[in-house]
Image (cartoon, helix red, strand yellow):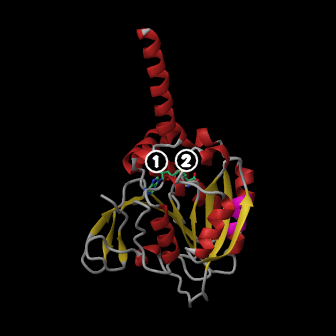
Amino acid sequence: MNMLLLAVALVLGGGVLWYLLIATEGVYLGRRVVIGLYDLYARRYDNIKQFDTEWEALTLGTPLAEALRHLPQPLILDVATGTARLPRLLRQAPAFDGVVLGLDYSWRMLRVAAEKLGETPRVALLYQDATHLPFADETFDAVTCLEALEFLPDPTATLSEIVRVARAGAPILLTNRKGIHARLMPTKTQPSEAFAAWLREKIGLVEVVVEIWQMEYDLIWAVKAGTPPMRQVRAWQAALRCPACQKIGFRADAISALVCLHCERRLPITAEGIVRYAK
Ligand SMILES: C[S@@+](CC[C@H](N)C(=O)[O-])C[C@H]1O[C@@H](n2cnc3c(N)ncnc32)[C@H](O)[C@@H]1O
């Protein structure tokens, strides 16, 4: 009898652990666990995902680059960039001549991203939590966030930030988890059409379109409402908010740091090229 109870307890305990750590990637246990798991799996992430690069270029890189073709040197923010999937795709897209900034809060995911990117002036990496995007309003010509919203501590806060830092008229590209993968995550996901309606009604996005994309995710294309303002091409560092004095604007100091234009606060840049914004 005791052995039977022990076996039942082990099976139940294993099931709960599988659910909390694997099926829902730690999201019900808080940000530290989510980031800890991504740090742990960073080196294996691309192998686990097995991205089909042709399909990815066709459905992500090329259409986004085409949507930005009319702008000289567009500036893109990829929130929760992981191993730089989207920056790599954009960099390869023939129509793209801009700069992509990848932001993530897993240091090891960013290190893998840096390795995969190699030296490139067209992509920058920033270590920071996606809950607060430390940029001036209306900075980016497009903002993307792929396969990540449901794992963030406050997706509504991140979406509000995404809209704030995007220019009026900017494309916004998101994903929505679906099917059994979504049903396993109650309170963190909703059906794609309901998500699209919520983006229109509560977040104020326009031209919201759901595109069937993968088994696990739909793509959501949207646009920030409003008339595009007069646009100046400027470096992303010029739009970065200082964590010390809260003012906007950094300059690069050789290659090892960004320096605040107002209070001289330094943000270190690692040898791999990652800017450490968060502590
Ligand atoms: C499933 S991966 C998606 C990565 C990439 N967007 C892609 O499509 O391959 C989720 C990413 O979200 C990041 N992430 C999770 N919580 C975060 C947070 N609070 N702030 C920033 N990034 C976060 C993880 O580190 C991970 O890189």
At numbered mark 1, what does the secondary structure look like: helix, strand or loop?
helix
Q: Is mark 1 within 8 Å of ligand 1?
A: no
Q: CA distance from mark 1 to mark 2?
A: 9 Å
Which quadrant is home to the N terminus? top left
Tell me where residue 122 appears, x and y as whole percent: 54, 66
Mark 1 residue type: Val
Q: Residues within 10 Å of mark 2 (few under 14, many from 20)?
A: many
Callout 1 crowding tier (Cα within 10 Å): few <14, some 14–19, many ≥20: many
| Residue that protrudes farthest toward the front in the picture | 1
Left or right: residue 66 compared with residue 246: right
Residue at the spot of label 2: 185
Q: Relative to residue 231, is residue 51 depicted above or below?
A: above
Which tag is nearer the camera, tag 1 or tag 2?
Answer: 2
User: Residue at the location (33% across, 60% down)?
Assistant: 278
The answer to the question of whether label 1 and label 2 lie on touching residues, with beta carbons closer than 8 A, is yes
* Region of the chain picked out in magenta, as a range: 59-64
The answer to which image quadrant residue 175 occupies is: bottom right
Of 41 and 225, nearer the camera is 225
**Viewport quadrant of the C terminus:** bottom left
Magenta segment, prevailing SS (helix, strand or loop): helix
The residue pinned by badge 1 equals 27
Give the residue drawn at x 65%, y 43%.
Answer: 180
Q: Position of residue 136 (x, y in %)?
A: 42, 79
Q: Amino acid at mark 2?
A: Met
